[in-house]
Image: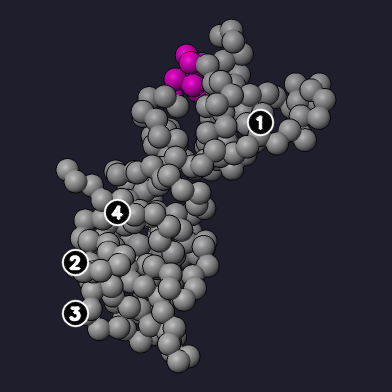
Amino acid sequence: MDMSKKQEVGSRLKRFREAQGISQKTLAEKCGWGASRIGNYEAGVRSINLDDAEIIASVLNIKPYEILFDSSEIDLIPNVHEIDIQPRLQSSFPLLSSVQAGQWTEACEAYALDEIDEWYEATVKTSKRSFWLKVQGDSMTSLSGVSVPEGTLVLVDTEKEHCNGSLVVAKLTDVNEATFKKFVTDGGQDYLKPLNENYKMIPINGNCKIIGVVVEARLRLI
């Protein structure tokens, strides 16, 4: 790809990124790359290959060809709109505090992506509206069966429907922070159940908002 073409592609990428209000640093982190990589693409210093275009497109929720070609080029390529390139999984999601997680709303994220310092990759398919949360305390530590000890990172998918038995992140109306528990239904009553039997179940009704379902857990040893 010659310099002029690289600059054209970089300029299109910049327009798409700025249209969504995402900084170069944030986009790079969500793609799992170093902070300077997006800047090099946009300046035309580095070529964007198809693999890279797929990753960027999945984060920006656009098609890879929209980055690589302008409208006149697309019109000259037969059936380009029908090409279905298998999307890659979004590579990383932000680590939120329990307070930030508790402030999550359906309308928009209650945090600025530029303010999040820690991002971690996901190894499962999940929605783009997902985040990591670090488990605090021992209420989800069990001597038998599933156990999620303190310090574990859990990936929360806010678009996944919860059901009886789901591990969820929820917020009680009278508490400012999110909590991680097992959602159970017993005799028509819903509860947030700790996995640790030393803690009591919390009955819930209209006083609780289920923020999302935990789809992955990861324990960092160092």
Disc 3 residue type?
Asn
Give the color scheme: rainbow, by chain, secondary structure or one colour. one colour
Whether residue 32 appears in magenta in the rendering, the answer is no
Q: Is residue 195 above or below residue 152?
A: below
* x and y percentages locating residue 125 in the rendered image: 50, 49
- In three-dimensional space, the C-alpha distance between marks 3 and 1, rounded to whole angstroms, equals 55 Å
Q: Nearer the viewer, mark 4 or mark 1?
A: 4
From the image, tell me which residue sits under label 2.
137
Nearer to the camera, 38 or 153? 153
Q: Label 1, on which residue?
A: 66
Above or below 48: residue 99: below
Which disc is residue 220 wearing?
Answer: none
The residue shown at (66%, 34%) is 85
Q: Amino acid at mark 1?
A: Glu
Dot 2 or dot 4, earlier in sequence: 2
Q: Mark 3 or mark 1: which is in front?
A: 3
Drawn side of residue 74 relative to residue 157, left or right: right
Residue at left 35%, top 87%? Answer: 203
The answer to which of 23 and 172 lies nearer the viewer is 172
Measuring from the top left, give residue 159's x and y in whole percent.
52, 61
Answer whether residue 96 is visible to the viewer in this image. Answer: no
Task: Name the residue furthest front.
Answer: 144
How busy is the neighbourhood of tag 2: few (under 14 within 10 Å), some, or many (20 plus)? few
The residue tagged 4 is 153
Q: Which residues are magenta?
A: 39-46
Type of amino acid at the residue the image marks with label 4: Leu
Q: Which mark is residue 198?
A: 3
Q: Nearer the viewer, residue 151 or 158?
A: 151
Label 2 secondary element: loop
- Frontmost of labels 4 and 3 is 3
State the CA–CA distance, disc 4 to disc 1. 35 Å
Q: CA distance from mark 2 to mark 3?
A: 12 Å
